[in-house]
Image (cartoon, rainbow, N blue to C red):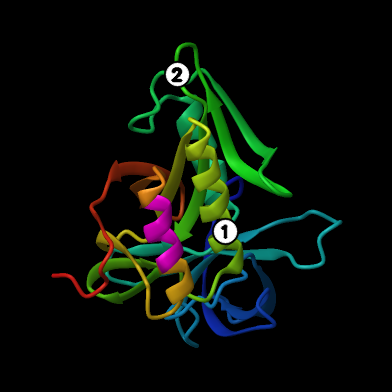
Amino acid sequence: MRFQTPLVPARLIRRYKRFLADIRLEDGTEVTAHCANPGSMMGLAEPGMRIWVEPNDDPKKKLKYGWRLVDHEDGHFTGVDTSVPNRALREAFLAHAVPGFDGYATVRPEVKYGENSRVDFLLTGDGLPDAYVEVKAVTLSRRPGLAEFPDSVTARGLKHLGELSRMAGQGHRAVLLYLVQRTDSARVTVAADIDPAYAAGLTAALAAGVEVMTLDCRITPEEVRPGKSLPFVMDATAG
């Protein structure tokens, strides 16, 4: 998925009210940007960080910049816009570029299922079980090379685990897909210390037949593109 408008670099002044960020552009202009991320953004919102924002000229939007990336200034990036992973994955699914889903011809986003829920993707194909895919964007890393989810307590994420477990029990394919939005990670785990209930729910979901998949991403100021599988480990202290 390529960004619609070329991104421009900036420095973060502060993030506040979850969805707002004061930033300083390279010419010194200070503006407020939209931060499309309701999470804690632990480790990603420190004042002074180099970031990349997307300008827009849409008269319907009050804010003329959207925060898209954190630039770690060592060749690595983290994507912080939570709308990007599903857009990038939809392109990848349609291009049959996601491992394990080659035979699925139809990709439907935001399909109602379970109890007042919507699954991120429902994939169908001749002779294949329907695949219900929930996508989680992973941005937290507290140890080098290890990406973690979640970065805060997630009642919504726990609910999704229950919904997926019920789909698996009905004979469908139920997949929890962790899309790692960091280019500096080699493994993925669950942050059990941050949300013990989610970790317990994930253990139960695995026992119920839910699949866990992990994919890394190519992330640059030009594009975000899902890539290869990464190892998943349940124990955050392993290794």
* Circles 1, 2 touching at the beta carbon (< 8 Å): no
Residue furthest right in the image: 60
Q: Residue at x 41, y 67 (%)?
A: 200
Marks 1 and 2 sit apart, C-alpha to C-alpha, by 30 Å
Q: Residue at x 38, y 29 (%)?
A: 97
Task: Name the foreground residue: 80 vs 119.
Answer: 119
Q: Quadrant of the C terminus?
A: bottom left
Q: Residue at x 49, y 31 (%)?
A: 172
Q: Position of residue 19 (x, y in %)?
A: 68, 73
Q: Is residue 1 visible?
A: no
Residue 202, image quadrant: bottom left
The numbered mark at residue 208 is none
In the rendered structure, which amino acid carries the disc numbered 2? Leu
Q: Is residue 40 visible?
A: yes
Q: Is residue 195 above or below residue 128?
A: below
The residue identified by callout 2 is 128
The residue identified by callout 1 is 82
Task: Point out the stretch of residues depicted in magenta.
Answer: 200-206
Q: Residue at x 41, y 64 (%)?
A: 78
Local crowd at mark 1 within 10 Å, few (<14), some, or many (≥20)?
some
* Dominant secondary structure (helix, strand or loop) of the stretch shown in magenta: helix
The reply to whether the magenta stretch includes residue 201 is yes
Asked which secondary structure carries label 2, the reply is loop
Query: Earlier along the polypeptide chain: callout 1 or callout 2?
Result: 1
